[in-house]
Amino acid sequence: MRRADDTPLRALVFDVFGTVVDWRSGLIGYFAEWGARAGRSADWAGIADAWRGAYVPSMDRVRRGEVAWTILDDLHRASLDTLLPVFGLGDVDDAARLEFVRFWHRLQPWPEVVPAMRRLRNKYVLGTLSNGNVGLLTRLAKAASLPFDVIIGADLFGHYKPDPETYRGACRLLNLGPGEVMLVAAHNGDLAAARAEGLATGFVPRRVEYGPHPSKDPAATAAWDVIAADFTDLADRLGA
């Protein structure tokens, strides 16, 4: 693929949670498995949704300087500690809480992702560009057999998306110009921030990211460089 200014595309960086992996089904399933072992019951879907709902507000507190730079694993733990009593699980011990945080390290991809990424990797460098920390993303990629060439996490920059430092930083680490790098995401706001820094943009909708709840990004809201139905379609459109 070449952009309108004839810049060749050399690398794809991917938003991970929601775009590459199905966080909601994964969290609900892992909570249910834990509950069966521990003889506990709770609204596992409600916990998963509330935990994800705390994701952006927790990062916003870091952006505003209310708390020092904190990796996503630790933000997840702080949010979890607040949520568990609300769902009748305030007595859960530290070992279980650590296990819960590490559910995020074992999330699985949407069905078409891995085969399509293998195709894309034959033509492009593939990397993450996620608000996850490098350790989290590395373990997730290994658990899900995701064929990334490079793991880029927010802790490399001390910033969370959509801060411009994340998009610029990814290009710097790849030693590529912004026009040579495409962000692939299911979230229009992420793509808008990437486009503002000169990156190419690829939209892939995940209409069931939030399960039965309406998706926050059911369709593209701008004329992104590529708008694909899924990763297979993305690979087709990018000639992989």
Image (cartoon, helix red, strand yellow):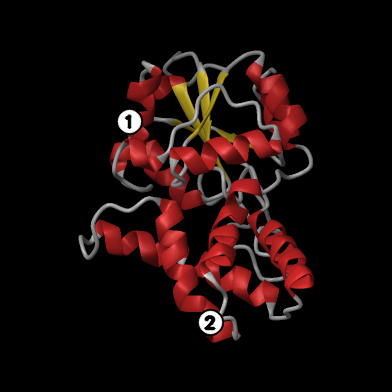
- Point out residue 212 in the picture as x, y percentages from the top left corner: 73, 70
Q: Nearer the viewer, residue 116 or 149?
A: 149
Question: What amino acid is labelled 1 in the image?
Answer: Gly
Q: Secondary structure at mark 1?
A: helix
Relative to 11, say whether 214 is above or below.
below
Q: Residue at x 65, y 64 (%)?
A: 210
Quadrant where the N terminus is found in the figure: top right
Picture quadrant of residue 57: bottom left
- Mark 2, residue position: 90
Q: Which numbered dot is residue 169? A: 1
Q: Nearer the viewer, residue 213 or 115?
A: 115
Q: Is residue 64 left or right of residue 39?
A: left
Q: Secondary structure at mark 2?
A: loop
Q: Nearer the viewer, residue 186 or 112?
A: 112
Relative to 236, say whether 136 is above or below.
below
Q: Do we see residue 56 in this rendering?
A: yes
Chain-order first, disc 2 or disc 1:
2
- Point out residue 7 in the picture as x, y percentages from the top left corner: 44, 15
Q: Residue at x 38, y 50 (%)?
A: 71
Question: What amino acid is labelled 2 in the image?
Answer: Gly
Circle 1 crowding by C-alpha within 10 Å: few under 14, some 14–19, many from 20 = some
Relative to 58, say whether 42 is above or below.
below
Q: Do we see residue 223 in this rendering?
A: no
Quadrant where the C terminus is found in the figure: top right
Q: Nearer the viewer, mark 2 or mark 1?
A: 2
Q: Which numbered dot is residue 225? A: none
Q: Is residue 223 left or right of residue 158?
A: right
Q: CA distance from mark 2 to mark 1?
A: 39 Å
Q: Farthest residue toward the left?
A: 65
- Point out residue 114 in the picture as x, y percentages from the top left corner: 73, 32
